[in-house]
Image: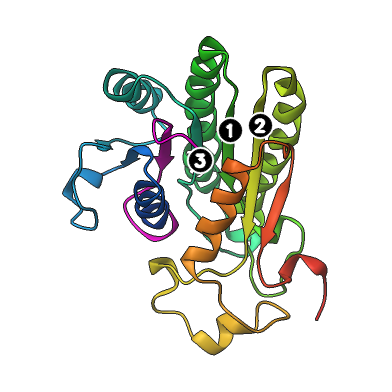
Amino acid sequence: MSIHKTIVITGASQGIGAGLVKTFLNKGWNVVATSRRISQTTLFDRTGRLELIDGDVGHPETAERVALTALEQFGSIDVLVNNAGIFLTKPFLDYTIEDLRRLSATNVEGFLHFTKQAVRQMLRQKAGGSIITITSSLTDHPIAGVNASLAMITKGGLNAITKSLALEFAGDNIRVNAVSPGIVDTPMHATDSKDFLKSLSPMGTITAIQEIVNGVVYLAESSNITGEVLHVDNGAHLGKW
């Protein structure tokens, strides 16, 4: 793809998001990356093709600021990766309405704010575009003992809206897809038992960050794929093992 393409990445200061930033920079893309305190990161080589914007994705002003920066610095928004997300587990009866609001603010409202900004700009550009959202294989296959019911309300909703928007904007060549990971080797699992994490998929392995990144790259560059939820989860969505 053209080196003039511009990608917006949320939740970009660590884990999958940081891997996305590095990979797309290496591929010659312009990158606008955001997270709450991303300007403090030392993970990235600062180049003229990288803009770092601090902000909470749950606030619409963050999406507005990111979109404006992308247009002022690079002139377009060609791909958006909705990677920012929070995840918490509790027995269902222990969850509070505050937990749901916190999950929804980042996972759902953040998606809405950024996707609206990206789609509006893509429609103006009349050149199509790609929206990719990171969800979770737990939406398809809950795992006994991993009590993530409220988090999955939000992630399952993202899978559903991915398909709806794919159809709504198919005629505009704006493709909308998701990548659905299982257990990924990110800082979120730094203190968890590796043996336990390996037990959470039938292949008995933990996914490397780059494998999720590769899935995003594939969807960003595959011009005939839309409405797809791509499972990169070592088979965890398949069922009981």
156 sits left or right of 193 in the view: right
- Tell me where residue 167 appears, x and y as whole percent: 77, 26
Query: Amino acid under label 3?
Result: Asn
Secondary structure of residue under mark 3: strand
Per the model, the C-alpha gap separating discs 1 and 3 is: 11 Å
Residue shown at the point (56%, 36%) measured from the top left:
108
Per the model, the C-alpha gap separating discs 2 and 3 is: 14 Å
The tag on residue 182 is none
The tag on residue 82 is 3
- Tell me where residue 30 appears, x and y as whole percent: 35, 36
The tag on residue 130 is 1
- Tell me where residue 48 appears, x and y as whole percent: 21, 36
Secondary structure of residue under mark 1: strand
Query: Amino acid under label 2?
Result: Arg
Mark 2 vs 1: CB contact within 8 A: yes
Residue shown at the point (29%, 43%) measured from the top left:
36
| Mark closer to the chain start, 2 or 3 | 3
Q: Which residue has dot 2 on it? A: 175
Magenta residues, start to end: 1-16
